[in-house]
Amino acid sequence: MKKTYKIDVDCANCANNMEAAAKKVSGVKDCTVNFMALKMIVEFEDGANVKNVMQDVRSACKKVEDDCEVFL
């Protein structure tokens, strides 16, 4: 399953860091961050609890870019 989330991030490098961090989260099959559109597309592994995984994604993104935001 894929879901799209609105994000707030200041630069393209920050967006790349967020994407890399999200891809490492358990339950995430793939992730793409589009800086220009300010969107994050997350593909979840089968059977993953989307709500819990996205909380982990948000935490992982905050660790690499503390001023970013992922709107759940």
Image (cartoon, grey):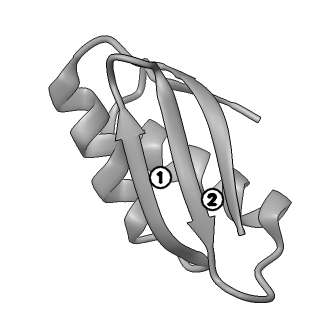
Residue 26 in percent (x, y) is at 56, 79
The quarter in which the C terminus is drawn is top right
Q: Residue at x 37, y 32 (%)?
A: 34
Q: Amino acid at mark 2?
A: Asp
Q: Is residue 18 left or right of residue 26?
A: left
**In which quadrant of the rendered view does residue 37 lie?**
top left
Q: Is residue 6 above or below residue 29?
A: above
Task: Determine which residue is flagged by label 2.
Answer: 56
Residue 60 image label: 1
Residue 13 in percent (x, y) is at 16, 29
Residue 60 in percent (x, y) is at 47, 52
Hey, which residue is sitting farthest bottom in the picture? 47
Disc count in the image?
2
The quarter in which the N terminus is drawn is bottom right
Q: Is residue 44 left or right of residue 49?
A: left
Hey, which residue is sitting farthest top in the picture? 10
Q: Residue at x 45, y 23 (%)?
A: 68
Q: Nearer the viewer, residue 6 or 21?
A: 6
Residue contact between numbered discs 2 and 1, judged by CB atoms under 8 Å? yes
How packed is label 2: few (under 14 Cα within 10 Å), some, or many (20 or more)? some
